[in-house]
Image (tube, rainbow, N blue to C red):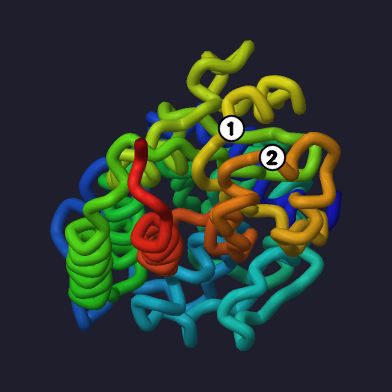
């Protein structure tokens, strides 16, 4: 498993199930130009940031994208090794999977943002009085918007965060409204070439649900966990209308590779050009580029033959 896909898998498979505790509605009061204290309700409780942070460390690729999208990029001094967007993010060898408190503290942060509390890193940083925002993987769309607002409040960019979420909502609504053919179509979303996938209960599955698409994985064994591994026999028998590949970077998968798999030549998606090559990162993050993920689905729906 390559490093980019490893990130997506860890975030979307290992963390999404913990996302119910994500931030719930931004701060009490708003960040001001004067840099006054604000309190943000995050998954690790009410977090008070004494002044507008000037040295932010992000250990989450999604939150790194958000910080730059809301105008807080100049305040970010270090990001984890997998924060590859935007290109000018100050990437380091910091790890979100095995965070090291000493390595983080060496950057002299006045705010640390992360999406998972690995190795008890939250308490370790709180012990030395570093404000920490734990904003887990989104379980639903409102969670994604809420976390953006939390970061806006915490960094002095509340208005920019609101504009971003308003724009995201509007773009997603336009895309869904323009894609009226999805109802009844079946799909398979591939996380890796070992046939790991998502069900409708996951954040990714709910995004597909906006279009009325039916997820073949919902009837698979061990589907209750949200991330089953399908058998080749089950997938071929289910014969999805659309196949979305979210493993083009990690696993070098594409339409040609799928068509060459044993037994896949007869799939409706293969025969009718319904295999869609996604960007792994965009398909696994719940931040500012979410509308691009939705647009890719919408484009595929519009091109697909109507369900029979």
Q: Residues within 10 Å of mark 1 (few under 14, many from 20)?
A: many
In the rendered image, the quadrant that contains the C terminus is: top left
Q: Please tell me which residue lies in front, 225 or 83.
A: 225
Q: Residues within 10 Å of mark 2 (few under 14, many from 20)?
A: few
Quarter of the view holding residue 228: top right
Tell me if label 2 and label 1 are in contact, CB under 8 Å. yes
Measuring 20% from the left and 74% from the top, which residue is drawn there? 163
Q: Is residue 50 visible?
A: no
Marking on residue 154: none
Give residue 210's position: percent from left, percent from top: 28, 45
Measuring 28% from the left and 40% from the top, which residue is drawn there? 183
Give residue 149's position: percent from left, percent from top: 27, 60
Q: CA distance from mark 2 to mark 1?
A: 8 Å
User: Is 175 positioned to the left or the right of 13 in the image?
Assistant: left
Q: Residue furthest left?
A: 29
Q: Is residue 64 visible?
A: yes
Measuring 47% from the left and 82% from the top, which residue is drawn there? 73
Give residue 47's position: percent from left, percent from top: 36, 47
Element at label 1: loop
Residue tagged 2: 266
Quarter of the view holding residue 173: bottom left
Residue tagged 1: 239
Q: Please tell me which residue lies in front, 95 or 241.
A: 241
Q: Nearer the viewer, mark 2 or mark 1?
A: 2
Give residue 168's position: percent from left, percent from top: 27, 66
> In the image, is residue 32 above or below residue 241?
below
Q: Please tell me which residue lies in front, 151 or 307.
A: 307
User: Is 216 positioned to the left or the right of 196 in the image?
Assistant: left
User: Is 191 positioned to the left or the right of 95 in the image?
Assistant: left
Element at label 2: loop
Measuring 26% from the left and 58% from the top, which residue is drawn there? 179
- Choose the circle earlier in sequence order: 2 or 1: 1
């Amino acid at each position: 498993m390559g490093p980019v896909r490893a990130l997506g898998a860890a975030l979307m498979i290992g963390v999404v199930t913990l996302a119910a505790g994500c931030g719930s509605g931004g701060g009490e009061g708003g960040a001001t130009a004067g840099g006054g204290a604000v309190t943000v309700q995050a998954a690790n409780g009410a977090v008070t940031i004494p002044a507008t942070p000037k040295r932010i460390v992000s250990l989450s690729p999604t939150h790194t994208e958000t910080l730059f999208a809301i105008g807080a990029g100049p305040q970010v001094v270090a990001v984890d090794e997998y924060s590859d967007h935007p290109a000018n993010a100050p990437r380091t060898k910091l790890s979100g999977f095995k965070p090291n408190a000493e390595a983080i503290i060496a950057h002299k942060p006045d705010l640390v943002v992360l999406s998972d509390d690995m190795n008890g890193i939250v308490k370790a940083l709180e012990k030395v009085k570093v404000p920490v925002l734990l904003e887990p993987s989104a379980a639903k769309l409102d969670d994604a918007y809420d976390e953006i607002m939390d970061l806006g409040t915490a960094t002095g960019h509340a208005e920019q965060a609101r504009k971003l979420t308003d724009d995201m909502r509007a773009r997603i609504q336009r895309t869904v409204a323009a894609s009226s053919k999805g109802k009844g179509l079946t799909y398979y979303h591939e996380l890796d070439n070992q046939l790991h996938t998502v069900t409708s209960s996951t954040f990714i599955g709910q995004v597909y649900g906006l279009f009325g698409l039916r997820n073949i994985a919902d009837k698979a064994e061990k589907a209750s966990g949200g991330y089953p591994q399908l058998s080749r026999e089950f997938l071929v028998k289910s014969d999805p209308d659309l196949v979305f590949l979210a493993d083009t970077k990690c696993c070098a998968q594409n339409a040609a590779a799928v068509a060459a798999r044993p037994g896949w030549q007869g799939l409706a998606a293969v025969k009718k050009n319904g295999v869609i090559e996604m960007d792994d990162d965009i398909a696994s993050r719940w931040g500012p580029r979410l509308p691009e993920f939705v647009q890719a689905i919408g484009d595929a729906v519009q091109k697909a033959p109507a369900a029979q």
